[in-house]
Amino acid sequence: MNIEQLRKDMVAAMKAKDKPRKEAISSLISAVKKAGIDAGCREEIPEDMVDQVILKELKTAKEQIDTCPDSRKELKAEYQFRYDVIHEYAPRLMSAEEIRSYILEKFAEIAASKNKGQIMKAVMGELKGKADGSVINQVVGELCK
């Protein structure tokens, strides 16, 4: 995903007078810009950085939904809507089976050692932004048994 597409979609939401959607996309753009400034690439923000920010915001929105009390139905619905909008822009993550085959193909020597720390260290750098860390941890745990 690139930031220009997010901007176009925000303008489309503004024209459609869809305020909740516009606000959700606007918060994504703000987070991406902040990450770009922090990384020192204000003008040209790479797509992989945009994807990482989207995944981080998706995780934050999921935590908001999970921690919101059931008695606050309107707030929970608002959080769910924001999560759904962000999810539209999130990159597709690898499944557990794809992660397993990737590890066995690319890191066969390290995987054979059954040292979870070494495997995680090698794999996390390669799969950052492509797979969920908890799923990677689960797969590596199964491989080390």
Image (cartoon, rainbow, N blue to C red):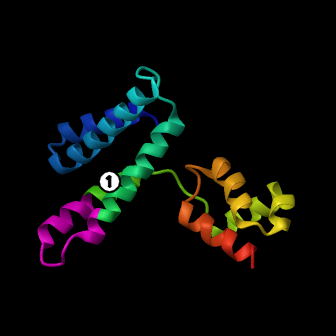
At x 73%, y 60%, the residue is: 119
Q: Which residues are magenta?
A: 64-81
In reply to whether residue 80 is colored magenta, the answer given is yes
Q: Residue furthest top?
A: 43
Find numbered disc 1 in the image and state the secondary structure of the residue it sits on.
Answer: helix
Q: Position of residue 103 (x, y in %)?
A: 75, 60
Quick check: 58 left or right of 98?
Answer: left
Quick check: 127 left or right of 119?
Answer: left
Q: Position of residue 86 (x, y in %)?
A: 35, 52
Quarter of the image with the C terminus in it: bottom right
In reply to whether residue 75 is colored magenta, the answer given is yes
At x 72%, y 52%, the residue is: 122
Q: Amino acid at mark 1?
A: Val
- Would you place residue 1 above or below residue 72 in this image? above
- Looking at the rendering, which quadrant does residue 136 occupy? bottom right
At x 14%, y 43%, the residue is: 17
Q: Which residue is mark 1?
A: 85
Question: Magenta region, mostly helix, strand or loop?
Answer: helix
10 Å crowding of disc 1: few (<14), some (14-19), many (20+): some
- Would you place residue 125 above or below residue 140 in this image? above
- Would you place residue 12 above or below residue 40 in this image? below
- Looking at the rendering, which quadrant does residue 28 occupy? top left
Q: Position of residue 32 (x, y in %)?
A: 38, 36
In the foreground, 98 or 49? 49
In the foreground, 132 or 94? 132
- Would you place residue 130 above or below residue 41 in this image? below
Q: Position of residue 6 (x, y in %)?
A: 36, 37
